[in-house]
Image (spheres, rainbow, N blue to C red):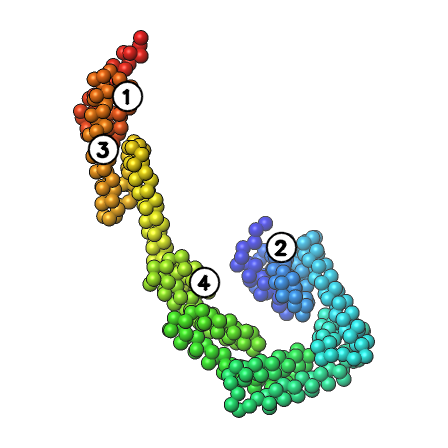
Amino acid sequence: MRISSLLVATIAVLASSCASLGDPFVLVFSVDDEYKSEAVTASGVDAYRESLVRDGDVSASPTVQRYFEVALRYDPANDEAARYLALVEDYRASKFSASLKTAEALLDKPKRSAAEEYRMLIAVRDAAAIYPGDDEARSLLKATEEPRKAFVVARLEEAEAMRAALAPDASDAARERVYIDAFRQVLKVRELVPRDVEGSRMYRELRSDITDIVEARLAGVDELIKSKKFTEARTVLALVDELDTSIGRTFSGDIQDSRYRLYLAWAASHEAKREWPQANARLREALAIQKGSEALAMQKRISAAIAAADKGASFEAGLKSLDARIREGDLIKAQRVLSSMSSAYTASSQRQQLDKRRKQMFDALGGIYASGVEAYRAERFKDAIALLEVVVAVDATYQEAADYLEKARDKQRLLDQY
């Protein structure tokens, strides 16, 4: 049974809140329980693959698990829902076990580095989030209460010391490094104690400082684009993207817009120089970000230019082949190439070049015709036929050649009878 994408999308929203809505399908339309179960399972599988497998977000486990529980409520015989429910539980159990193992091993160490302390506290946090009621997890939370407080204080003091040591006349690069390093310390605090008052205050201040840097950098990117310093602009955007990641991707939309403008301008620069492959490559990067009207219009122009360039390249190759046939005296093959090219290439300049070759071939026919007539009169009819066929193939209006060709064929047929 195939499920429509609209239904699956609707179910993804409704099933996630099924506990408060009762039967989510009642709000949409009436369908049988087997269909409901299959639809919820499809959404659950997507959530499992994205949240757990791809992102490794163990905190999403209860939400993902709820999809399959709902699916089994509608259809207890749904084997796929039962299998994925077991997979989610296995995932949670394995993550819980790994977190406990890490936390206990580090807790037993008499001395721990700051990095080890952080790993231990995160492992305890994860174990408690996976199974909040587990006695072992609760015991670990209590055992690490003081180390957690000490870690939070130490990280906030470290971040404050970084800012205090920053000279008033520090360069933008130095200021940026300090803000980012301090911000990373504060983020560790927020991961462990999201509601810490001092941590929240420093988070807001540092986030504001980094925001100012990002905005200034983006303005600088636009200036680089105007100056056609495209490689430099791309490098700066990569740095801005890294900065933005540290503040929760606040400017991801603005960065993508800048990146789109960069690749569009870069493509236009190559287009102006008739560098079609390079222009097309940059344009594809722009279109991967946004299918704007200006980019789509450029795509049509560049595609047409590439097609014309390819055709021109084919024309030159055809001319070389045609010239080679003429030089070799193989005028029948030369005529075939000429006929094919005449129908394919109609530009005035191309026709002129083809007419030039056609004249060369016609000029050669007089000598071939004379040789054919001479062979006929000497009763070498096979030689006469071969020569006169060339003349007629190249110039079908050459009536004298056609007449001699017909007579030579008649004579040869008579000879072939004896």
For image coordinates 31% across by 10% down, the residue present is 417
Q: Which residue is mark 3?
A: 364
Q: Position of residue 286 (x, y in %)?
A: 43, 64
> Marks 3 and 1, how far apart in space?
17 Å
> Marks 3 and 2, how far apart in space?
79 Å
Cβ–Cβ below 8 Å for labels 4 and 3?
no
**Residue type at mark 4?**
Glu
For image coordinates 34% across by 44% down, the residue present is 317
Q: Is residue 139 visible?
A: no
Query: Disc 3 or 1, which lies upstream in sequence?
Result: 3
> Marks 1 and 2, how far apart in space?
82 Å
Query: Disc 1 or 2, which lies upstream in sequence?
Result: 2
For image coordinates 72% across by 59% down, the residue present is 86
Q: Position of residue 411 (x, y in %)?
A: 25, 14
Cβ–Cβ below 8 Å for labels 1 and 4?
no
Q: Which residue is mark 2?
A: 38
Please name which of the two marks, 3 or 2, marks the residue nearer to the observer.
Answer: 3
Tell me the quarter of the picture where residue 84 sits: bottom right
**Residue type at mark 2?**
Glu
